[in-house]
Image (cartoon, rainbow, N blue to C red):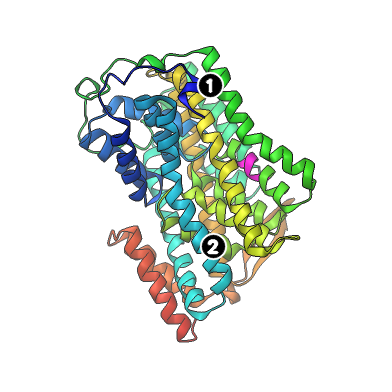
């Protein structure tokens, strides 16, 4: 996909930022993109807005708000958006691809190590400590997003309703997002003050006016909406996304593991609103409970991998796809099957991200301060807090207890921990991680590293 295909060639950009310089900056952003979406967005803001002064604060937050309304990882989509603003389609392709590439290669390498050496005491101990620390990181996400989103009783009520809906009533995650979005849209239309929220993640740092940046205040020529261009780009992206999945279904049938991986993660690409933490509970419930691709503890291991490698946290889906095919390889060698499934998972997860940006960004650039859009974002973000809390509770049940019982009450199926099966070593490590994160404000990477080493020591000592 090139600009020659998607839009007639133009002269060098008026802002004077060379494409080569942009590639180097996006590679730098990708290498530093640790710490989840909040950290990744902060790094992008520091480099692109404050340091390079390529775009200003208002344009950065406007793009971010749109990305937060989309399914998929908002940090990666923000990179695509800014890359597109600066250098048209090729700029968006390079920025988005570089943002994903380091994480893809890292998770693939760790997946190989996991299946080849996961039973070794050293590796098992490292992952034991890692999953204990991940619980603290998820709880931190609940607090971080909640402190921004739950600014009034209406937002608290939405978060509580979302938690009850997904944890107790098992309402599908996409329906929760849809319901919250409709409530927010209606609240915005009538001008209810409870739905007049902030601007997404926020970026921090000093504000840089758009007029003092390379891009300036005016819309670039290529950013103006064009129906013909939108149809071309959407057609190409849809073909790249869906033709491989359709081919697998026709060739292998719907029950083959590759077909199931392609279809399932294509569905996730459409409904993954609210970031990785929000959707992982839904993915875990399906991958563990429905497809039986992996165990609950292995989901924590995968999230730990994603937390400690650059790139979007949603890269944990690559690990899920790898294990799914590794354990049902068919006629292929297991490692080959796992690697192909990892590539397939990554492809169907991220190709749609380019579609959402290239299709919608030209139209979104014409919107500034739309009240209904802002209110929709506010309501979805509040609901996401309840969904992330569900993820934390689900992980805690399966990481801290060796047995979890299913109990039916009032027609609902609840997961209740068997208290006698508590894993004392995991409980102690998790408690230490929570204290380090919330009391002493220790960074994520040091906590993950310390817990991994502690898990290794406990494993070698025969305790874990």
Q: 91 left or right of 412?
A: left
Q: In the image, what residue occupies the spot 35% across and 50% down?
A: 31
* Residue 265 within the magenta-colored segment of the rendering: yes
Judging depth in this view, the residue of 194 and 336 nearest the camera is: 336
Q: Nearer the viewer, residue 391 or 150?
A: 391
Q: Position of residue 179 (x, y in %)?
A: 59, 32
Image vertical order of residue 460 relative to residue 418, above or below = below
- Rendered image: mark on residue 186: 1
| Residue 380, numbered label | none
Q: Locate residue 436: give its quadrant.
A: bottom left
Q: Is residue 150 visible?
A: no
Residue 235: x percent and y percent?
61, 24
- Answer whether residue 108 is magenta in the image: no
Q: Nearer the viewer, mark 1 or mark 2?
A: 2
Q: How many marks?
A: 2
Q: Is residue 16 visible?
A: yes
Q: Residue at x 61, y 44 (%)?
A: 165
Query: Badge 1 local density, few (<14 within 10 Å), some, or many (20+)?
Result: some
* Residue at the image position 37 percent from the left and 18 percent from the top: 368
What label sits on residue 111 in the rendered view?
Answer: 2
Q: Residue drawn at (67%, 51%), measured in percent from left and top?
A: 286
Q: Which residue is at the front of the view, 423 or 359?
A: 359
- How much space separates mark 1 and mark 2, taking CA atoms? 45 Å
Image: 52 above or below 421: above
Going by the image, does 55 lie left or right of 418?
left
Q: Residues within 10 Å of mark 2 (few under 14, many from 20)?
A: many
Q: Which residues are magenta?
A: 264-268
Indicate the position of residue 22 as horizontal and vertical percent values: 31, 35
């Amino acid at each position: 996909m090139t600009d020659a295909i998607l839009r007639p060639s133009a002269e060098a950009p008026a802002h004077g930022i060379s494409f080569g310089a942009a590639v180097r900056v996006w590679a730098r952003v990708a290498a530093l993109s640790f710490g989840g979406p909040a950290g990744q967005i902060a790094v992008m803001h520091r480099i692109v807005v404050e340091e390079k002064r390529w775009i200003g604060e208002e344009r950065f937050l406007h793009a971010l708000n749109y990305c937060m309304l989309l399914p998929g990882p908002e940090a990666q989509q923000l990179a695509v958006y800014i890359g597109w603003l600066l250098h048209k389609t090729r700029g968006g392709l390079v920025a988005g691809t570089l943002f994903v590439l380091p994480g893809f290669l890292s998770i693939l390498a760790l997946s190989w190590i996991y299946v080849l050496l996961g039973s070794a005491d050293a590796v098992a101990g490292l992952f034991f400590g890692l999953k204990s620390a991940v619980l603290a990181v998820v709880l931190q996400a609940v607090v971080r997003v909640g402190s921004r989103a739950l600014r009034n009783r209406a937002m608290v009520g939405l978060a509580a309703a979302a938690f009850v809906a997904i944890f107790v009533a098992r309402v599908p995650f996409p329906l929760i997002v849809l319901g919250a979005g409709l409530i927010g849209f209606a609240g915005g239309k009538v001008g209810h003050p409870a739905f007049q929220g902030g601007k997404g993640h926020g970026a921090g740092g000093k504000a840089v006016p758009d007029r003092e940046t390379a891009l300036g205040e005016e819309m670039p020529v290529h950013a103006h909406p064009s129906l013909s261009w939108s149809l071309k780009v959407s057609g190409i992206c849809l073909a790249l996304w869906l033709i491989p999945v359709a081919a697998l279904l026709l060739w292998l049938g719907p029950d083959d593991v590759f077909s199931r991986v392609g279809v399932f993660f294509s569905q996730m690409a459409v409904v993954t609103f609210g970031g990785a933490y929000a959707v992982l509970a839904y993915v875990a419930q399906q991958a563990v409970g429905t497809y039986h691709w992996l165990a609950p503890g292995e989901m924590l291991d995968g999230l730990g991998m994603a937390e400690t490698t650059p790139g979007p946290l949603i890269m944990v889906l690559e690990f899920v796809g790898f294990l799914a095919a590794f354990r049902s390889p068919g006629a292929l060698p297991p490692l080959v099957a796992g690697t192909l499934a990892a590539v397939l998972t990554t492809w169907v997860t991220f190709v749609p991200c380019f579609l959402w940006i290239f299709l919608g960004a030209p139209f979104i650039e014409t919107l500034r301060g739309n009240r209904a859009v802002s209110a929709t974002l506010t309501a979805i973000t509040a609901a996401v807090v309840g969904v992330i809390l569900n993820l934390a509770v689900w992980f805690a049940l399966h990481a801290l207890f060796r047995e979890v019982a299913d109990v039916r009450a009032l027609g609902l199926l609840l997961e209740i921990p068997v208290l006698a099966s508590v894993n004392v070593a995991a409980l102690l490590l998790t408690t230490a991680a929570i204290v380090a994160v919330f009391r002493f404000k220790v960074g994520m990477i040091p906590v993950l590293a310390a817990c991994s080493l502690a898990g290794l020591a406990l494993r070698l000592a025969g305790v874990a």
